Image (tube, rainbow, N blue to C red):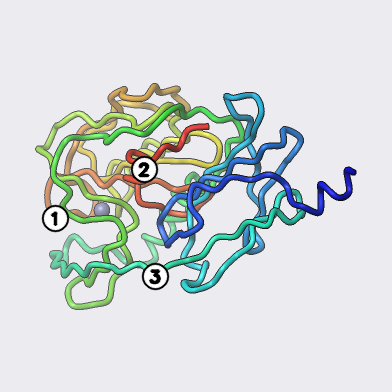
Amino acid sequence: MAAGKAFAGVPVELSSEKVSQGSVLFVRVFDKTAKSVKIKETTYPLFESKDGVSKGVLIGVPVRWNSGERYSVEVDEKTTGKAVEVEEKSRKLEILTIEKSKLVSNEETAKQGKVLLAAISSLKIEKLWNGNFLKPVEGMITTEYGTRRTVNGNKGGVHRGVDIGAEEGTAVKAANNGIIAISRKHILTGNTIVLNHGAGLVSVYYHMSELTAKENQKIKKGEVIGKVGSTGVSTGAHLHWGIWIFGVDVDPFELIKKEIDF
Ligand SMILES: [Zn+2]
């Protein structure tokens, strides 16, 4: 009986039932007619899967999902019987000193930040990324994702990406296929690229010495898009690499280590 089946819940598979802020949750729904997944008042679109029998979406776990809480996973507003539990995540602390001349006013930062955020939140429906992401430049991680910072003794924000130390001029590769949404100089993030991978994912590359890809250009995974530098507010040559999913920052290494494709 159809009604009975619906009551039993839509067949759904979660990559994990335990999540934490910055982690990536993969939801697969075994119903090709399903359109969306809803968790804690946010609705995420579902995308066609390569297997032809399911649909999927990657979701970044935001700060507003409270640790210790359980949120049910709905498909097209229907119950699935599945839920995710949010666990506390510990954060490292880093103390930074930046020359006064290199600091920029909040006003300037806010203005240019808006341009970046618009690109980061932009939603391209078509899925352009394929397979796992790659680390855009070889080098040591100098600041991990999620590190709390103080700048010149003042409370700074949380580091929403990873810093990879590398020599000035080292080639920076695209972490996956996509279209360049932004390729321009920003007062805070220096020479900046925002690469749109589709299906809600974008990757960002900051502080480069040179930009070699243009806005609206189609890019393949591994293609060179710029060179490592120290432009903007930066204390030495490095690449700041970040990944955002539907406007929520996540730990980029989650997309390298985990099985994420669908
Ligand atoms: Zn950084």
Q: At x 35% / y 67%, what residue is drawn?
A: 89
Camera-side residue of 58 and 150: 58
Q: Which residue is mark 2?
A: 204
Q: At x 36% / y 25%, what residue is drawn?
A: 221
Q: Which residue is mark 3?
A: 88
Q: Amino acid at mark 3?
A: Glu
Q: Amino acid at mark 1?
A: Thr
Q: Amino acid at mark 2?
A: Val
- The residue carrying pointer 3 sits among few (fewer than 14), some (14 to 19) or many (20 or more) residues within 10 Å by Cα, namely few
In the rendered structure, find residue 248 and report the number of the disc placed on it: none
Q: Which residue is mark 1?
A: 235
138 on left or right of 56: left
Establish if 110 lies above or below 251.
Answer: below
Q: Which is closer to the viewer, label 2 or label 3?
A: 3
Camera-side residue of 142 and 75: 75
Q: Which is closer to the viewer, label 1 or label 3?
A: 3
Quadrant where the N terminus lies?
Answer: top right
